[in-house]
Image: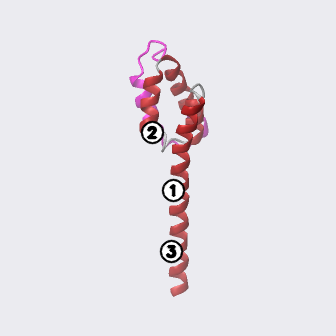
Amino acid sequence: TFIRAHNFEHTLRLSEMLLNDSHDLIHKATGWMLREVGKRDVSVLNSFLDRHAAIMPRTMLRYAIEKLSLSSRTSYLAVANVKKRKKMKEEENSNNAKKRRKKKK
């Protein structure tokens, strides 16, 4: 009802609160809500994605960008991939440091 009435404040606030939720179905539902916001006002969705795409769960992001142009979808997915690669590199460095410490003992 809020989304249909173009009252996006509650939806966006709730979406921000659910960014770190661990359940996949919550990611799907949140992405769906964001996609519906974007159908009514794409600038509101783009603003949200500009702030949060890098930290959004992939499922949530995929649902949210579903109706955007190909170039927009590609751009937001690239932001998310950079974050993922950075996290993987940090984990790799951490694991290597742990291995070096074990070898010293």
Dot placed on the residue nearer the N-terminal end, 3 or 2 = 2
Secondary structure of the residue carrying tag 1 is helix
Residue 15 is inside the magenta segment: yes
As shown in the figure, which amino acid type bears the numbered disc 3? Ala
Residue that sits furthest to the bottom in the current view: 105
Q: Residues within 10 Å of mark 1 (few under 14, many from 20)?
A: few
Q: Residues within 10 Å of mark 2 (few under 14, many from 20)?
A: some
As shown in the figure, which amino acid type bears the numbered disc 1? Lys
Q: Quadrant of residue 25?
A: top right
Residue that sits furthest to the front in the current view: 71
Q: Nearer the viewer, mark 1 or mark 3?
A: 1
Expressed as whole percent of the image width and height from the top left, the position of residue 10 reads 41, 24
What's the residue at 53%, 38% (across, down)?
Answer: 75
Expressed as whole percent of the image width and height from the top left, the position of residue 47 reads 42, 30
Residue 86 got which mark? 1
What's the residue at 50%, 80% (across, down)?
Answer: 101
Q: Residues within 10 Å of mark 3 (few under 14, many from 20)?
A: few
Nearest the viewer among 34 and 20 is: 34
- Residue that label 2 marks: 52
Nearest the viewer among 28 and 45 is: 45
Dot placed on the residue nearer the N-terminal end, 1 or 3 = 1
- Residue that label 3 marks: 97
As shown in the figure, which amino acid type bears the numbered disc 2? His
